[in-house]
Amino acid sequence: MARIVALMGSPRRGGNSEILLDAFLAQRHEGDPCVKLIPVEMDLGFCRGCRFCERMGHCVLHDEMETVYRVLLEADKVVVSAPVFFYGFPAHFKALIDRTQVLWARRYLFKEPMKPKEGFLLSVGATRGEKLFEGVTLTTKYFFDAFGCHYRGGLFFRGFDAKGSIRECSSCLREVEEAGKSFLQP
C-alpha cells in the first residue's frame, strides 16, 4: 500500500491542473490512501527568511504547514499538478514550497533520516514558450529533494489557458492516465 500525497498548485478549482491531477490519481491502486492538498484553501503563512528552522529544526510560524510536513514525510509517492504563472508556480503553492525549508534543514543540517519517496510533476501553461516549464521543473526537483523525494519525471502541456480546455485533448489525458498507471501502481 502506497501513501500518496497530491499537491494541487492552482488557485483555480476545477481547472486544467486539477483535471490532470484527478486523471493521474484515478490510476492509483484501489485502497492506496491519498491526501490531496490545495494550498490556496489552506492557512499558510509566507516564509520570513528568518532562518529559525536552521537553528531549531522547526518553523517559527504555527499553521497548517505542520500537517503538510507530516504528510510529506509519511508519503511514498508525491504528485504535483500546477499551472505556470510567469514561468513559475502560483504564489500560494510557491509559499508552501518555500516553507519546506524546514524539511531541508532537518534533512541536511540536523541529519534527520527521511523515508525515500518518489515524485512526479504535471504542469500546464497557456503559452507555447520553449522554456515554459524550466522554472517549475527546477523548483520541483529542489522542493522534492528537501524531503528525500526522487524526481521521476513529469508531463507538460502547452497552449491551454481556458478553464477545462485540457479536456479537449484526449491524447493529453491518455498520456496522463498512462503516466499515472506507471507511477502509482506497484
Image: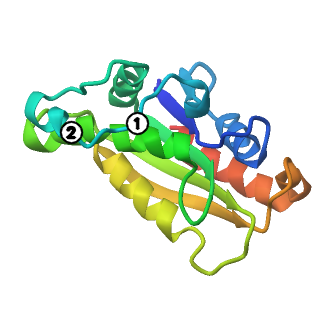
Disc number placed over residue 102 in the picture, else none: none
- Give 66 or 148, whichever is nearer the viewer: 66
As displayed, is residue 113 above or below residue 123? above
Residue at 46% in and 26% down: 3
Q: Give percent across and percent down for residue 64.
A: 43, 20
Tell me, yes or no, whether the two marked residues, 2 and 1, touch with CB atoms within 8 Å.
no
The image quadrant that residue 147 belongs to is top left
Q: Distance between the residues labelled 2 and 1?
A: 11 Å
As displayed, is residue 114 above or below residue 172? above
Residue at 60% in and 64% down: 86
Q: Which amino acid type is shown beneath numbered disc 1?
A: Phe
Disc number placed over residue 50 in the picture, else none: 2
The image shows a total of numbered marks equal to 2
Residue at 29% in and 39% down: 116
* Secondary structure under the numbered disc 2 in the rendered image: loop
Q: Is residue 1 left or right of residue 157?
A: left
Could you tell me if residue 164 is visible in this image?
Answer: yes
Density class for disc 1 (Cα within 10 Å; few <14, some 14-19, many ≥20) is: some
Q: Give percent across and percent down for residue 133.
A: 56, 67
Q: Give percent across and percent down for residue 49.
A: 26, 43
Q: Mark 1 points at which residue?
A: 46
Density class for disc 2 (Cα within 10 Å; few <14, some 14-19, many ≥20) is: few
The image quadrant that residue 76 belongs to is top left
